[in-house]
Each structure stands twice: as structure tokens, then as C-alpha cells.
Image (cartoon, rainbow, N blue to C red):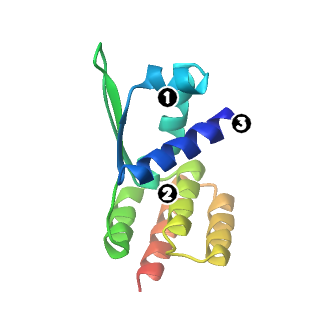
Amino acid sequence: MISDVIEKMLIKMLTDEGGQLELRRNELAERLGCVPSQINYVITSRFTPERGYVIESRRGGGGYIRITKKMIHNDEYLMHLFCAVGDVIDRRSATLYVLELLERGLVTDREGRILSAVLSVIEDDETRANALKKAILAFAN
């Protein structure tokens, strides 16, 4: 799938550039043989704050998109995550947070699967947020 190719390419470019990448959407789309909106889709759906990314963009003739991977220590990240969850969280966002915990090695695969399963069956966004925050506190100890 083209979205997966774009994501892998951007991650490699971010790694090669030390965690910050500035690109021109049209140039990248031309290089990959896709439409610029496909680049936008990948950036907005896969390079989210929940996954530790900051996106900046400037429109116009010299416009660019800057992607920055936040480099913070695990203890700081857990505190950031706890605050970022807020009072309510939908299933999709909760799943992205669990994936980030897995990617950072803060939870094992088994813990991540259990947490994802529990969060996915909770219907109420407020209850899901409370459950996720309690889990984050447990992982911090």
C-alpha cells in the first residue's frame, strides 16, 4: 500500500536527519508517483502527537512541511502522555498511545495487547481515559 511506503520512507528520512525533517509535499509526491494529498493523509494520520511527532507547515511558494520526532526520556514521556490523555479519549487515539508505549519499549508486547483489549471494550470515552491514565501510572512505577 502506498501509505505504508510513504510512512517507511518518511521514518527513514527522519532517522537519517536526526529526528527533524523538512520537505516539500509536491516534490515528494512527484518522487513517489502519488498525489500530494496522499502525503498529507500519511502525515496527518501516522505522524500524530500521540505517536510523539510535531508537525509544522507553511503554505505558499516556498512552503514546506516540517516533521519533528520529540526526543524525550521515558519518564518525561509517561508524564506527557498522562497529561495528554485528558478527561476523554476515543478508541483510535487510545490505540495510538498504546502503540507509542510499545515502540518506546515502555510496555511488553503482552502488556500492550492486554491494554489494547481492555481499552477497546470500554464504551465510554471518559472511562477509557481514566483506565489509560491508571495504566500509565502503573507503568511509571
Which residue is the site of mark 1?
40
Answer with mark 1 or mark 3, whichever residue precedes in sequence.
Answer: 3
Rendering coords of residue 91 (x, y %):
59, 52
Q: Residue at x 67, y 73 (%)?
A: 114
35 displayed left or right of 81: right
Give the CA distance from mark 3 to mark 2: 34 Å
Can residue 86 be seen here? The reply is no
Which residue is the site of mark 2?
126
Q: Secondary structure at mark 3?
A: loop
Disc nearest the viewer among 1 and 3:
3
Answer with mark 3 or mark 2, whichever residue precedes in sequence.
Answer: 3
Instruction: Assess disc 2: are there few (<14), some (14-19) or many (≥20) residues with their C-alpha within 10 Å of its C-alpha.
Output: some
Answer with mark 2 or mark 1, whichever residue precedes in sequence.
Answer: 1
Disc nearest the viewer among 2 and 1:
1
Instruction: Assess disc 1: are there few (<14), some (14-19) or many (≥20) residues with their C-alpha within 10 Å of its C-alpha.
Output: some
Please say if 96 is above or below 138: above
